[in-house]
Image (cartoon, rainbow, N blue to C red):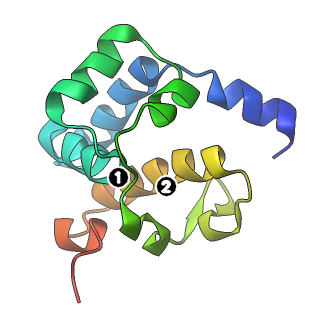
């Protein structure tokens, strides 16, 4: 993906993407609570912090810049999202965005929460 496309994606409002994540999960019998759990696991936000980001309508660049702490196990997230191998993405912000996309994909595919949160041995 070229830099112009990256900049466009970075400008997407988290509040616009979030309902799509929930819809994708709920279509596969998962819950909003589970969506929140994986996003909070990845970013370090608590529920109040996540809701504040939505209310403020921050873009993805700001959402990740203000994230309390990226999960150290995020680097264990691998696979393909939007035709691109997550582990091969060079731009750090795009990598974080795709990590979040991948977690929601795994949730929608019915993976166990322990595997999604990279806690299973």
92 displayed left or right of 72: right
Residue beneath disc 2: 99
Cα gap from disc 1 to disc 2, whole angstroms: 8 Å
Give the structural element (helix, strand or loop) at label 1: helix
Viewer-proximal residue among 7 and 35 = 7
Res 83 quadrant in image: bottom right
Residue 13, image x, y percentages = 50, 19
Viewer-proximal residue among 68 and 109 = 68
Residue 4, image x, y percentages = 85, 30
Residue beneath disc 1: 42
Task: Say which residue appears at 29% left-offset and 66% top-offset.
Answer: 116
Quick one: label 1 or label 2, which is nearer the N terminus? 1
Mark carried by residue 109: none
76 displayed left or right of 42: right
Residue 101, image x, y percentages = 47, 48
Task: Say which residue appears at 72% left-offset and 51% top-offset.
Answer: 91
């Amino acid at each position: 993906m070229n830099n112009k496309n990256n900049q466009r994606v970075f400008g997407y409002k988290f509040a616009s993407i979030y309902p799509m994540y929930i819809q994708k999960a709920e279509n596969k019998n998962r819950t909003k609570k589970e969506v929140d759990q994986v996003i909070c696991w990845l970013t370090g936000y608590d529920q109040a912090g996540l809701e504040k980001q939505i209310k403020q309508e921050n873009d993805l660049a700001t959402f990740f810049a203000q994230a309390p702490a990226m999960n150290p196990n995020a680097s264990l997230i691998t696979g393909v999202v939007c035709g691109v191998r997550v582990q091969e993405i060079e731009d750090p912000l795009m990598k974080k965005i795709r990590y979040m996309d991948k977690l929601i994909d795994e949730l929608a595919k019915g993976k166990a929460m322990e595997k999604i949160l990279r806690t299973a041995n």
